[in-house]
């Protein structure tokens, strides 16, 4: 009987030593990516989408594919670490393209925190697609979303991560900014 007890205790000890740490990347909560859309002219928050991935990654690389709209073009943003397209939209010369992906949840489905402070990402912002090489002031658009509960939550989960963004210009033939939108990406 004593040998069975010692054998069971040894097996329990061995099993507990072979468990992976619950904080290791393989056992962490699924990684998320928040995509937000803000109107360029009014700085009104228009909607968002939350992607969930089955594992986590320590890096956050967004790459763009940009096809100049000679007639029709497109812009895609790909999350390199997950080999996934997270934004896909058309561009039109002398017309207006549209966002094909992701499908956004309307802005009225998100809540704002009743706070008076303003927060910024510690590591700042990174423009992930700027084919026109313009310098833009994105702070008014950031003010429109920085008090959202979901934005604050994502910033808390990855406080040192840059917020990625770009200006989506679906109408490429003219200079009128009708339909232009800021697109923000936050790792969570």
Image (spheres, helix red, strand yellow):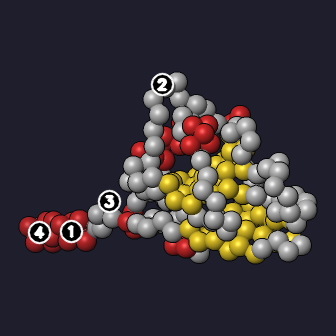
Neighbor class of circle 2 (other Cα within 10 Å; few <14, some 14-19, many 20+) is: few
Residues at badges 4 and 3 in contact (C-beta under 8 Å)? no
Q: Quadrant of residue 166?
A: bottom right
Residue highlighted by disc 4:
6
Q: What SS does tag 4 mark?
A: helix
Which mark is nearer the camera, 2 or 1? 2
Q: Is residue 152 above or below residue 19?
A: above
Which mark is nearer the camera, 4 or 3? 3
Which mark is nearer the camera, 2 or 3? 2
Identify the mark at residue 116; answer none if there is no mark. Answer: 2
Structural distance between the alpha carbons of marks 2 and 4? 61 Å
On screen, residue 177 versus residue 141, left or right, reads: right
Q: Quadrant of residue 164?
A: bottom right
Give the percent coordinates (x, y) of residue 69.
Answer: 82, 71
Residues at badges 2 and 1 in contact (C-beta under 8 Å)? no
Identify the mark at residue 17; answer none if there is no mark. Answer: 1
Residues at badges 3 and 1 in contact (C-beta under 8 Å)? no
Structural distance between the alpha carbons of marks 1 and 4? 16 Å
Give the percent coordinates (x, y) of residue 51.
Answer: 61, 57
Structural distance between the alpha carbons of marks 2 and 1? 48 Å
Q: Is residue 65 above or below residue 112?
A: below
- The quadrant of the picture occupied by the N terminus is bottom left
Residues at badges 2 and 4 in contact (C-beta under 8 Å)? no
Structural distance between the alpha carbons of marks 3 and 1? 15 Å
Lower position in the chain sequence, tag 1 or tag 4: 4
Furthest residue in direction left, as rendered: 2
Which mark is nearer the camera, 1 or 4? 1
Lower position in the chain sequence, tag 3 or tag 1: 1
Q: Count of labels shown?
A: 4
Structural distance between the alpha carbons of marks 2 and 3? 34 Å
């Amino acid at each position: 009987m004593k040998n069975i007890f010692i054998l069971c205790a040894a097996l329990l000890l061995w099993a507990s030593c072979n468990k992976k740490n619950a904080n290791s990347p393989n056992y962490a909560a699924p990684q998320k990516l928040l995509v937000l859309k803000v109107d360029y002219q009014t700085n009104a928050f228009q909607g968002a989408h939350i992607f969930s991935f089955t594992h986590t990654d320590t890096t956050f690389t967004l790459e763009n594919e940009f096809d100049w709209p000679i007639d029709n073009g497109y812009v895609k943003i790909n999350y390199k670490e997950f080999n996934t397209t997270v934004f896909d939209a058309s561009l039109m010369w002398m017309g207006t393209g549209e966002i094909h992906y992701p499908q956004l949840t309307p802005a009225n489905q998100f809540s704002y925190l009743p706070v008076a402070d303003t927060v910024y990402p510690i590591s700042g912002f990174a423009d992930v697609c700027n084919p026109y090489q313009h310098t833009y002031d994105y702070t008014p658009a950031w003010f429109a979303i920085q008090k959202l509960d979901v934005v604050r939550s994502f910033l808390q989960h990855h406080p040192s991560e840059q917020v990625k963004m770009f200006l989506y210009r679906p109408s490429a033939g003219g200079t009128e900014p009708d339909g232009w939108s800021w697109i923000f990406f936050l790792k969570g």
